[in-house]
């Protein structure tokens, strides 16, 4: 039995599990095994720390006359054998002779202890990682299963799902990998750790590692947006007027941002200054393009950004990346147009304002509904026009007819310059 004490000490030392958890598991195992042999009786197991022995007691009620020998013991026998001070009605723990139960109990105890050890280990792992959500984790690629990468973290494994991987990155067994600990989920087989290399927070944490001013709170990363593996933008603000937020994040000769880019396998990172003025923020977010002016629609949380013709492609970016990232960074809907397009839209608005019943506010409502010109208005459903302008459908149909007439006159004028297009 002393061997049992040694085994418990070894498990506590090597697995880091609370000894009380193991002892409790052992006592439960003994009761379970004894009940399998003796039936569903009122049993209790107690572990003796000094001897390493587990004693099993059957609790019986002290009575004057026994009617059920499994649950009762008479007063005389109870006082003579177990407790001279007991009284009728007391619950008395009577030691159970194990005999041939020892081998069965040992087997069941072993199984239950192993299960409890596994459960305790799972709890330890869960408690260790639940508070590390949002941190960058280092591991080694173990294997790939159906596109998911299994990462060994030492004490446990984590999963980098296919959807959280950067398409252009490839990993092999044994490669070192860093990723954001995105989720910690409790599962029946143990906690599941979900990693990500595509989440914007991964970018934020990399700057937290590379830039002391970010780590210390002098510079705040206000927003992040990514097209993983291709391009990213972060908006930064300095809480110290003497510290340039962009310069601090870039580092001397680009040393700090280079560390981030290397970890992201070449993903281009734009660092822009955050501003509480949406127009200035938009100008910064669309860098390196230069913008001419911004038209803001606070109600729709949208803005039209007007740029010179030679800045249009730069503002939009390759496959629309620049404007998409800027919009995500700001949380606004952005519409990029050229100066020429802006002039055309202004002219179209003026044409619509010549229609009976329309004024600048109503034309603005139509534009919000993606009705930018006479042709759009003429072809829009009457119900939509009525709802947008808060007028009757009859009035909407009359307005549509006027728009159609004006548009047709415009087409005729374009083909025959001698015809006056004014309705």
Image (spheres, rainbow, N blue to C red):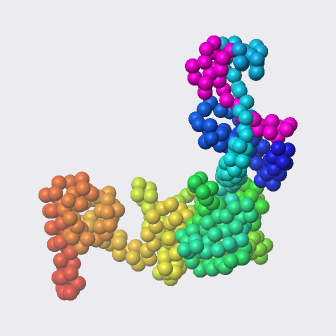
- Quarter holding residue 87: top right
Q: Residue at x 68, y 47 (%)?
A: 104
Q: Position of residue 70 (x, y in %)?
A: 61, 27
- Quarter holding residue 93: top right
Whether residue 56 is in magenta: the answer is: yes
Quadrant location of the C terminus in the rendered image: bottom left
Q: Is residue 232 left or right of residue 375?
A: right
Q: Position of residue 263 (x, y in %)?
A: 70, 73
- For this rendering, which residue is in front, 49 or 344? 49
Q: Residue at x 61, y 42 (%)?
A: 36
- Quarter holding residue 199: bottom right
Q: Residue at x 21, y 70 (%)?
A: 379
Q: Is residue 287 visible?
A: no
Q: Is residue 321 visible?
A: yes
Whether residue 336 is in magenta: the answer is: no
Residues in magenta?
Answer: 47-75
Q: Residue at x 50, y 72 (%)?
A: 323
């Amino acid at each position: 039995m002393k061997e049992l004490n040694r085994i418990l000490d070894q498990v506590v030392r090597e697995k880091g599990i609370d000894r009380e958890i193991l002892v409790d598991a052992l006592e439960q195992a003994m009761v379970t095994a004894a009940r399998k042999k003796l039936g569903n009786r009122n049993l209790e197991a107690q572990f003796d720390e000094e001897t390493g022995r587990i004693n099993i007691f059957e609790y019986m009620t002290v009575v004057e006359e026994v009617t059920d020998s499994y649950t009762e013991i008479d007063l005389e026998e109870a006082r003579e054998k177990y407790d001279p001070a007991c009284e009728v009605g007391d619950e008395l723990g009577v030691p159970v002779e194990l005999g041939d139960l020892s081998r069965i109990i040992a087997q069941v105890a072993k199984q239950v202890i192993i299960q409890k050890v596994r459960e305790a280990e799972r709890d330890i792992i869960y408690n260790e990682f639940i508070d590390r959500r949002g941190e960058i984790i280092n591991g080694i690629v173990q294997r790939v299963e159906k596109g998911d990468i299994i990462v060994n973290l030492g004490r446990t494994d984590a999963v980098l799902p296919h959807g959280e991987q950067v398409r252009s990155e490839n990993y092999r067994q044994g490669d070192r990998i860093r990723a954001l600990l995105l989720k910690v989920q409790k599962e029946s087989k143990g906690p599941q750790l979900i990693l990500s290399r595509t989440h914007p927070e991964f970018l934020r944490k990399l700057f937290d590692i590379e830039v002391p001013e970010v780590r210390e709170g002098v510079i705040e990363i206000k927003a992040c947006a990514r097209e993983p593996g291709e391009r990213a933008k972060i908006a930064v603000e300095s809480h110290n007027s003497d510290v340039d937020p962009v310069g601090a994040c870039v580092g001397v000769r680009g040393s700090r941002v280079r560390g981030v880019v290397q970890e992201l396998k070449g993903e281009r990172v734009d660092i822009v200054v955050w501003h509480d003025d949406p127009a200035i923020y938009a100008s910064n977010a669309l860098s390196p393009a230069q913008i001419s002016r911004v038209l803001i629609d606070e109600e729709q949380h949208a803005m039209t950004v007007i740029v010179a013709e030679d800045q249009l492609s730069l503002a939009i970016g390759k496959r629309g990346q620049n404007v998409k990232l800027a919009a995500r960074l700001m949380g606004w809907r952005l519409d990029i147009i050229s100066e020429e397009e802006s002039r055309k839209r202004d002219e179209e608005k003026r044409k619509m304002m010549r229609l009976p019943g329309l004024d600048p506010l109503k034309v603005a409502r139509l534009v919000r509904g993606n009705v930018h010109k006479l042709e759009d208005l003429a072809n829009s459903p009457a119900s939509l026009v009525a709802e947008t302008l808060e007028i009757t459908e009859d009035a909407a149909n009359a307005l549509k007819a006027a728009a159609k007439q004006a548009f047709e006159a415009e087409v005729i004028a374009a083909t025959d310059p001698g015809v006056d297009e004014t309705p």
